[in-house]
Structures are given as C-alpha cells and as structure tokens.
Amino acid sequence: MTKPNPSPTNGSASAKVRRRFKATFWPTVITIPSILILIGLGFWQLHRLDWKQELIDERQSRSQGPALSLSQVPGDLDQAEFMLVEVTGTFLHDQEFYLGARTREGRVGYHIVTPFQLQDGGSLFIDRGWVPQNRKEPTARIEGQTEGGVTLQGLVRTDGWKGVDFAKPDNLPDERFYFWLDLPVMAATAEMPQLITDFYVEAGPAPNPGGLPKGGQSRINLPNDHLEYALTWFALAIALAVIYFFFHYRPENSDTPSAGTSKEP
C-alpha cells in the first residue's frame, strides 16, 4: 500500500506566505504629506546651512586684515558692520553705561559702554567688554579706568534690538542700564558734541590694565548645526516611509476589516 504524501501546507514551518502591498486610505492621507513636510524641512535646513556659512565667512573676512580709520567706514552700515577699525582718543569714564545681562564662560555680568572723545574731533561709544556682576562699579576695577589718550582696535557694530519684538525688554535710561543699545537715547544722556549715533565700536581682545573689562566679545564664529538638523529631518522622513511600507506589506489573506465591522466566525 502506498503511503500518502504529507501536505506541504499542513503545519509546515517552511511554507511560504505570499505578501503584497496594499495601501489604505487614512494612513496614506496622513503619512504622505508628513513625509513631504519632513523632506521640505530637511532642504530648508540645508539652505540655512549655506546662509549661516556665508554669514560666518563675511564676519571673518571683515574682521581680519589691516584696521581702517573711521573715515574709511562705508556709509552703508550693512556693509560696514564687523569691519575692523582703529581709533585714538580719550575715555570719559564718568559717563559710562551698562549693557546687561551678558554672559561669559557661563558667568553673568555686564558690558561697559563708554563715550570716547576722538583725537581728531567728534566722539563715539566704545563697548569696552565684559565685567562680572561684582565688578560693575568703576571703583571695583579702578586699574582699568585708563586715563589720557589711548589707541584701540575694534569692530563696527550697529545698535537696536535684534531679537523678536514680543521678547523686547525695556531699557532703563535713568539708571544708564540697557538690555540693548539705543545710541540716540544714550547720546542725549551723554550730551557730547558730534557724537556718532549710527554705529559704535566693540573693543578687540587687547587686555586692559587690571584685566577688566575683557574685550573681544564679538561673535564671529557662530554655531552652525544646520547640517545635523537637516539629517535629522531626512532620517525621520525615511523612518516614517519604512513604517508606512511595512504596515501595508501584509499576507494576502490578512486584510484588516474596516472599523465597525467584524469577521464571521
């Protein structure tokens, strides 16, 4: 008697399951636009990467090389900002202002902004640099209150609030304390003749007597993490696409019934 062959599908672990891709409506409606948005965000971050690098290169090129005189500063302040200049004159320490709150190496402090009487006439404001909170008063850093004529180099900067409007804090002119520099208001307080209010100068890193204020606080090398952000958005788009594919790549006989229905026993 011939023995019957065992059925290849009867509990066989090696039986092949046929699968197919079948998209469903709502997961597709939600997932496809989401993937496109994530890809768009990735390309936007690549655009930001190029923009930030151009900004860094511009600041580096302007802040290096021979220092210019004030007469060589372009009238277009967009072209002048971060240019290196050299000025000679005398600090008027009795009229200094305070710019807060400024951090350095994780410590909160102030920038000391002092009117500077130019040797060849006129005057302008100099951001001399950072001091810690307990050295705000001039008597706490008397060595740095240099007397007589000095020559210094620094970068041309423009004033005004550079953040979003809803976060803009109010300055305290009566206390000579500013969260953001408002040169025309400061000039009215200083009452100095021929005071330049179109721009000011951020002092370079040359040390002051006694070590304070600490100059060289200009931000030249800005953080540029946009490539990492772009890769993150692209990775999320790929992950979502993979999840979408495997969600719909099922055995042919495993279609999920629509909501509100049940399978017959």
Image (cartoon, grey):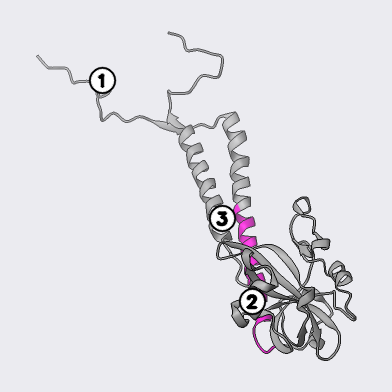
Q: Whole-percent x and y of residue 42?
A: 59, 54
Q: Quadrant of residue 44?
A: bottom right
Q: Give the class, few, some or many, for how many residues have Cα within 10 Å of label 3's Cα (few <14, many ≥20).
A: some
What main secondary structure does the magenta stretch of the protein show? helix
**Disc 2 versus disc 1: distance between alpha carbons?**
83 Å
Q: Position of residue 40 (x, y in %)?
A: 63, 51
Residue 207 versus residue 177 in the image, above or below? below
* Quadrant of the image occupied by residue 176: bottom right
Q: Alpha-carbon distance for marks 1 and 3? A: 52 Å
Amino acid type, callout 1:
Asn
What distance separates the C-alpha of mark 3 from that of mark 2? 33 Å
Residue that mark 1 sits on: 10
**Measured along the vertical axis of the image, is residue 69 above or below residue 180?**
below
Residue 229, which numbered label?
A: 3
Amino acid type indicated by mark 3:
Tyr
Q: In the image, which is nearer the foreground, mark 2 or mark 1?
A: 2
Instruction: Check disc 1: other Cα within 10 Å, few if <14, some if 14-19, many if 20+.
Output: few
